[in-house]
Image (cartoon, rainbow, N blue to C red):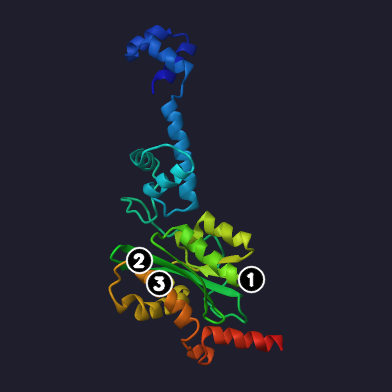
Amino acid sequence: MTYPLVTDLADEGIPVAATCRVLGFSKQAYFKWRAKPVCDRDLSDAYLINAAFDAHHDDPTFGYRFISDELETQGFVASENRVQRLCSLQRIWSVHAKKRGLNRRPGPPVHDDLVRRDFTAPAANVLWLTDITEHPTGEGKLYLCAIKDAFSNRIVGYSIDAHMAAALAVAALNNALVTRDVASTIVHSDRGSQFRSNAFVGALHRAELRGSMGRVATCADNAAMESFFSLLQKNVLDTQRWRTREDLRLAIVTWIERTYNRRRRQRILGRLTPVEYETIYSVATAA
């Protein structure tokens, strides 16, 4: 944009007509810009970019397609191609996208590590552990976010969806809060973008829960949840090729609710099921 240069030179006493002639455009074009320095299209782009930054900040997993859908729900009118162009110009990419030449180090933690690899708890609802796993179906991947109580190993909340966005983790947390009486419960996770998102952090704060995050690339920080996911893999996920997401979703829900929580005995719990272990503890403490 050379129009501001004309203004600067005019302030120094150089005639506008002479500058426009040298730079190769008419005085009319310059004065039209002077009357309205920012065109409607540029202003519209600026609003779209600002809204795209907000949507991506709330959920870093969003790429331009999800951002385009989010902008549409907010009342913006813009084609997907336009959103893609603006996101590319502003380097707004999903954390899962391949970005050549960019450093893709894990994101910084938004919580301190309150657990320090001690995944035991003296009572229910003192420490919850959460993580996300995925499995392919004939319709595409299906994602599961599960929350486990470290005291009884009971799955207290979970959410299943076709997209691994922050909403998946928030839904699992809300599911757990419906059935559990919590107070200052620690919710420990890895540094995945879903757990670092504004949406998930905000949900923790509203429920007065305390977030905790482990270190990067530390196997022990994931081992507590991996034990559950390993059982799920063996007993459900790998038992057949799943044709639809709905078929797999129903199988996961059935196994968690009917088998894992209520029928599968665990040696670490004294050969009791998670539900039995919690029931016996609650009766003992009430006596």
Marker count (numbered):
3
Amino acid at circle 2: Arg
Q: Residues within 10 Å of mark 1 (few under 14, many from 20)?
A: some
Of the two numbered discs 1 and 3 in the rendering, the one whose residue sits closer to the viewer: 3
Cα separation between marks 1 and 2: 32 Å
Q: Position of residue 46 (x, y in %)?
A: 46, 34
Q: Which residue is mark 3?
A: 250
Query: Is 124 in front, or is 138?
Result: 138
Placement of 115 over or under 112, stated as above or below: below
Three-letter amino acid code at the position of disc 1: Val
Q: In x, y percent, where is residue 152? A: 55, 82
- Say which quadrant the C terminus sits in: bottom right
Could you tell me if residue 223 is visible in this image? Answer: no
Report x, y in % for residue 237. Answer: 34, 75
For the point 59% across and 62% down, the residue is 204
* Residue receiving disc 2: 245
Q: State which quadrant residue 44 falls in.
A: top left
Question: Disc 1 designates what residue?
Answer: 182
